[in-house]
Image (cartoon, helix red, strand yellow):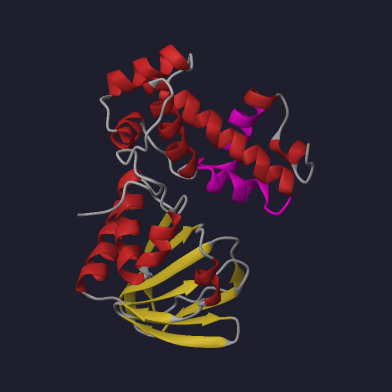
Amino acid sequence: MECPLYYPIQSIRLHARRFTRRYAFPPHVQPFHQFYCVLAGQISQRVEIARHRLNTGQAVWIAPGLEREPRALSKSGEYLVIEFTAPWPELGSNTGTPCQLNAATLSDARALAGLQSVATDSQPASILFHHLCLQLLPAAWFSAAAPRPLSDEAPDTRDPDTARLDRIEQVLAANTGNPLRLEDIASLAGMSRSALGRLFMTHRGQSPCARFRELRLERARRLLARGERTVTEIAMETGFSSSQHFAGVFGRKYGRPPSDFLGRPE
């Protein structure tokens, strides 16, 4: 499938469940965007005061902080919920609006449900969700968010290795919410893993993955200082699997827990 290597939607988490007639979730609020999709059956989904009847192949976007309350309208079925963060305020203004999936996007949604058993925040899941979103959301949003490709080099009088490293780090900084592996970083850079490793060790004194983790922690520290999100939200937004994992890595880097930096600009 064709999909840009830059992923503007940050960390995603999947929840795919089969349901029975008894399925009725109490009113609740989530701190992340949600894509709620019915894969089989029929569900009633209330978002604030609006209630929508969602049939097989229909979905609804739900912005953070809004109360939602789903319940079954059929004897059985299956649904998929994807939690994520996105850079587009326009997505929040359209919250609660149902959308109809076509054959391709419904196929993507069902494939995502199958990936849950493998890894809920895996790179294949991120790529697949972006592919789905590219078909459901305005393409202009992605074009506006994407950085200049590494191959589109402008004339640069600096040392070639320095210029290349700077461009690679720009792309890494734009992907701090994605759990990129060494092979993913090499793909973004258009280099082999061994060549990329030598480049970073020679000029940065650390591996590409160590530098990427450093960039994620630097971004997390800036987000903490703003005081606009919880530690858990920031952990997810910077690509960590849990707030506990984030706290451990952050503490080893800065000598204090993330909570000590909340709302404290330096």
Label total for image: 0
Q: Is residue 250 magenta?
A: yes
Q: Is residue 95 above or below residue 209?
A: below
Q: Which of 37 and 191 is in front in this view?
A: 191
Camera sees residue 118: no
Residue at the (32%, 46%) spot, across then down: 5
Residue at the (59%, 34%) spot, across then down: 217
Viewed as shown, does residue 227 lie left or right of 194? right
What percent of the width, then of the height, locates residue 158?
A: 44, 23
Q: In this view, does 191 lie above or below 129?
A: above
The residue stretch that appears in magenta: 227-251
Residue at the (68%, 51%) spot, across then down: 230
Write down the quadrant of residue 20 in the picture.
Answer: bottom left
Q: Main secondary structure of the magenta part?
A: helix
What percent of the width, then of the height, locates residue 132?
A: 31, 63
Which of the image's four quarters has the C terminus? top right
Write down the quadrant of residue 250 in the picture.
Answer: top right
Q: In this view, does 213 lie above or below 25?
A: above
Camera sees residue 256: yes
Q: Which of 151 and 15 is in front in this view?
A: 151
Q: Does the magenta stretch include residue 186?
A: no
What percent of the width, then of the height, locates residue 76?
A: 33, 77
Viewed as shown, does residue 225 lie left or right of 246? right
Residue at the (61%, 34%) spot, across then down: 218
Write down the quadrant of residue 100 in the picture.
Answer: bottom left
Q: Nearer the viewer, residue 70 or 189?
A: 189
